[in-house]
Amino acid sequence: MKKRNKLLALLLAAALTVSVTACGSSDAGNDAANTPSETTTQDETDNEDDAQKEDTDSKADADSKTDADPLATAQKNMADVSSLSGKMIMEMDMDVSADGATQSLQTITTMDMTYFNDPMHLKADITVDAGETGTSSSSIYAETAEDGTCTMYMTDGTNWQSQTAEPEILAPYNVSNTMTQYMESGYEFEAAGTEEVDGANAYKYTASLSGDSVKEALSAAGALDSFTSLGISAEQLEGMMSEAGDMEINLWIDEANLYPVKYEMDMTSVMNALISAIAESMAEQAEDVSMTIPKMTFSLTCSDYNAAEEFSIPEEAKASAPAAE
């Protein structure tokens, strides 16, 4: 029984670990904040006077509405975003069989986010709906003080906690950097026509990650480190990754303003390949125990570019912050 429980724990950890990949990583956020396009823009700006900058901006606006590549223009537009709203949805269906019995679990995790860049402050409302198992909700706020110190406030709906927050902790809630990183990750996006997203026309792009690309994505998010901490060897990891399936990706860019409006990823085949490899590596411990993931998808929708609704951090949240020394 203990062996089976260990296997189930490993399989569940694998599912949760890969799900973290979808939410981005601190390294991804830092990379996005230092992209070549952003650095170049800053260098050029430093060498221009105000009149030249105005002419350049006007030309860029004109180009973006004419023959500019929508994907390239969207990447550039993200460098100047001051605020936006985002909605992340992750759906995961899980079937676990042990001792001749099968149990199914469907979860939908939703995160509504509002992000402001200067000074940085954000809000995220998170809901995990596990069907008959129940629903849980939590909220996270963060703000930056004049001295650059960042404080994070968290509540489960009953109690508040607060802590000094490091940048890597807040990376998953920085919806601006997350979307930027998804567009600039080196995926070979291909144009796939246009579709409507939330009632507006949008350019659609598709890509597929496989092999080393999937491994790099998991490694960047710290997923592979999590597997080794569970007792899985580097050799086993290599075998798992070689069997991993493709990860299908779709990206939509608003036709009118050339901002990314939606990103989605299907991780079902990758997740099942990893779970199968883990079970195989455990041999006898995996007898009569199995787990499959019929569905595992992730989407991120962005809106309110440079026009997000301002919010206030609740007074009870601030009251939970430690007193200044």
Image (tube, rainbow, N blue to C red):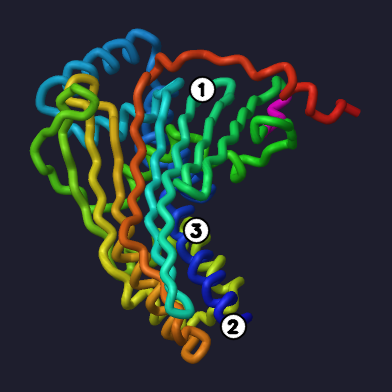
Q: Earlier in the sequence, mark 1 or mark 2?
A: 2
Report which quarter residue 100 is drawn in.
Answer: bottom left
In space, the residues marked 1 and 3 are separated at their CA atoms by: 28 Å
Q: Is residue 143 visible?
A: yes
Residue 50: x %, y % from top left: 39, 10
Q: Which residue is mark 1?
A: 116
Q: Residues within 10 Å of mark 1 (few under 14, many from 20)?
A: many
Dot 1 or dot 3: first in sequence order is 3
- Residue for point 71% across, 30% down: 149
In the rendered structure, which amino acid carries the disc numbered 2? Lys
Q: What are the residue bounds of the magenta stretch?
A: 147-154
N-term-proximal mark, 2 vs 3: 2
Residue under label 2: 3
Q: Quadrant of residue 96?
A: bottom left
Report the mark closest to the observer, 2 or 3: 2
**Residue at 44% in and 38% down:** 110
Tell me: 9 left or right of 202.
Answer: right
> Could you tell me how far apart the alpha carbons at marks 2 and 3 are, in whole angstroms?
20 Å
Assess whether residue 51 is covered by the magenta stretch. no
Residue type pointed to by label 3? Leu
The amino acid beneath tag 1 is Phe
What element does badge 3 sit on? helix
> Which residue is most to the front?
101
